[in-house]
Image (cartoon, rainbow, N blue to C red):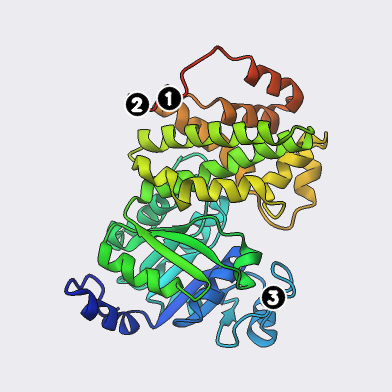
Amino acid sequence: MRCVGYRGDRGTISACLALAVTRVSVIGAGSWGTAVAALAAHNAGTTLWARRPELAEAVDERHENPVYLAGVRLPESLRATAHLGDAVRAADVVVMGVPSHGFRAVLNEARSEIRSDAVLISLSKGVEQGTLLRMTEVIGEVLGEGGTRSDPARIGVLTGPNLAKEVAAGQPAASVVAIPDAAIAEIVQHVFMTPTFRVYTNPDVVGCEIAGALKNVVAIGVGMAHGLGYGDNAKAALITRGLAELARLGVALGGDPLTFAGLAGMGDLIATCSSPQSRNRSVGVALGEGRTLDEIVAEMNMVAEGVKSTAAVLELATRCGVEMPVAEFVGRVLYDGANPADHVAALMGRAAKSELQGMRDQ
């Protein structure tokens, strides 16, 4: 990759951007991975990896993802393959669009083919169960095994209020690329920027990742409130108190408080908690209506990250000594079979507190 790490006047850097990235690989052909691949294809040669050969063929030949983005026309320049090594071998930027529970396994499979100077970007909004690692930490751990390819300056995350179908359809949207090195961040920013998709940079990888993981948990809780028939006041209260929990844990782990007021924090939280397109919100709505989690998951063809990551988030909170009553409420319903209505009453009956408790003292 040429020009990465270059620091000079902004005009020179901008002129260099077109030379910096020539090949992008997106690993994972779900709705968001496909949408991101379509964005990158406007700016660089892009290959999308799909596990199923028939899906890769549909994207490559018919320029459509009929399983996850049916009816959306993809750029003809976007290529697809079911061969992981072929997808990543020449890539300047490797984008991991794999859910958190399968992230490590796929990255391990691709590891030997990823270039030592490639930039790695995660799209996953979850925490690895067991290890409690964020996905950029998983990247660093996997690529660092037996080598020195885990430079944190080249590992980041793309996150924000980005519902895949709207982005793929060309509706206006904004996102954040969080990566520590400012020069690399600017290059990656331009990989995904299009006339309808605006990308900002942020050096706070920790805050952006924690925000992405926790907003899914909160969205399940807000969905439950909707399924129970509660109105906008209740849902607004849950969103706002969920944001407080998100910020408390994020700051405790080293995140910048300002991140949680931005696109990765409040922005993503609003979109995920409010949109019927949100898988996590939909799970919550169904739970609030009285359906079982097994029934709900059996009918989904895509993963709702919050279902799996809530447990890991709660473990992180316990490790950090951070109080998270909304997340605990979601966890009891998901894992203990608790009745959502009963736990709303318990949540409302908690002792009176200051709104800023646990925030100013961190």
Secondary structure type for disc 3: loop
Mark 1: amino acid? Leu
Q: Is residue 179 above or below residue 345?
A: below
Residue 236 percent across, percent down from the top left: 62, 36
> What numbered label is drawn on residue 360?
2
Mark 3: amino acid? Val
Q: Quadrant of residue 60?
A: bottom right
Q: In what quadrant of the picture does the C terminus appear?
A: top left
Q: Quadrant of residue 222?
A: top right
Identify the residue at image location x=26%, y=61%.
181
Residues 307 and 201: in front is: 201
Is the Cβ of the residue at disc 1 closer than 8 Å to that at disc 2? yes
Relative to 229, is 56 on the left or the right?
left
Foreground mark, 2 or 3, reads 2
Identify the residue at image location x=31%, y=84%.
19
Foreground mark, 1 or 3, reads 1
Is any part of residue 11 visible from this angle?
yes
- Residue placed under numbered mark 1 in the picture: 356
How far apart marks 1 and 2 lie (CA) works out to 7 Å
Residue 24 percent across, percent down from the top left: 44, 76
How far apart marks 1 and 3 lie (CA) works out to 44 Å
Identify the residue at image location x=66%, y=66%.
165
Q: In what quadrant of the picture does the N terminus appear?
A: bottom left
Mark 2: amino acid? Arg
* Among numbered discs 1 and 3, the one appearing first in the sequence: 3
Residues 44 and 265: in front is: 265
Q: Is residue 340 above or below residue 166?
A: above
- Residue placed under numbered mark 3 in the picture: 72
